[in-house]
Image (cartoon, rainbow, N blue to C red):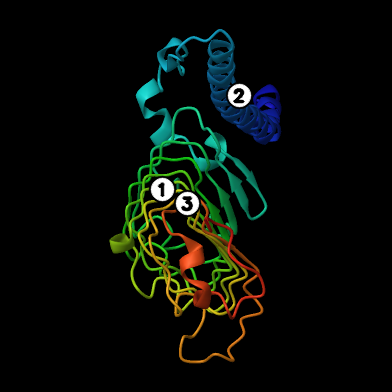
Amino acid sequence: MGTVRVLLLLSFILSPWVLCSTGKHFNQDSTLEQRDVLFNREAYLEARRSKREAALRLGEDYDSSMVFLPADEPDDAAASELPTCLLCVCLTGSVYCEEVVPEMSAVPTLPKETAYLYARYNKINKITNKDFAEIVTLKRIDLTGNLISEIQDGAFSKLTLLEELNLAENQLVKLPTLPGKLTTFNANHNQLKTKGVKANAFKKLEKLVNLFLGDNALEAVPVIPENVRVVHLQNNNITDVTSDTFCKGNNTHYIRPKLMEVRLDGNPVLLSKHPDSFTCLKSLPVGQYR
């Protein structure tokens, strides 16, 4: 009986230690497994990038099917299932998604504290009302060099802090309603025509300083807010300017000191035919005079 009691006592003493040790090993195994998953994802992305760069150096077409995810994660699900901060680079308040592999065709899901988004040179083709609906902290969006041909009209309506919006080098034919606090708007190298730009598209943007609309198909100069300093309208189809385009035709004493740079070069308009259209400006527009 004495021996049995000793064995029972030892079992009570050792049981918690055994369970604790087992749990510890389980937690270690779980942590290692998570690390392995992250490592596999990172290795996959690095392999895709290296393959693409090597193909470009050799002048070959990049074939994304040459590199695969692990067997339980099919390649065609990579872009949609990987978290944004695995596909992109996420720093405090900033998300960098430039030339993402696999190719990005839609605005990614962003951390709610994002203030700066750089998603240049991807294949994003549309911006919806939901893309930025919950990211009210955004101050700058740069979507240069995508395939954007459509932006739903309320896509930027909740971005009350947005100051810079860059949509250059896309395929836009019309503009949506823009946020009221913009200081810089860039839509160079699109397919904008005057009918695709609302009459008051910029009129109410009282803080706008830089307006870039070069290399489009505009037939007329849009209404330019008073605070604007730089306007680029080069290489459009503008054929005429009037005394109300930049100045106030009914007020010969009106001076516009803030508007320092106007580019109208590369347009059909002959500026020397409209001398009264620039009397309020401190410098003449750049363009064709003879």
Give the Cα distance between marks 3 and 2: 35 Å
Residue 14 at x, y percent in the picture:
69, 30
Q: Name the residue under label 1.
A: 190
For the point 62% across and 26% down, which residue is it? Answer: 32
For the point 45% across and 28% down, which residue is it? Answer: 102
Q: Do the residues labelled 3 and 1 touch (CB within 8 Å)?
A: yes
Residue type at mark 1?
A: Asn
For the point 51% across and 41% down, which residue is it? Answer: 84
Q: Which mark is residue 39?
A: 2
Left/right of residue 31 with respect to residue 143 in the rendered view: right
Determine the secondary structure under disc 3: loop
Up-down: is 248 above or below 44?
A: below
Between residues 10 and 212, which one lies in front from this camera angle? 212
Residue type at mark 2?
A: Phe
Foreground: disc 1 or disc 2: 1
Between residues 138 and 264, which one lies in front from this camera angle? 264
Residue 164 at x, y percent in the picture:
57, 61
- Quarter holding the N terminus is top right
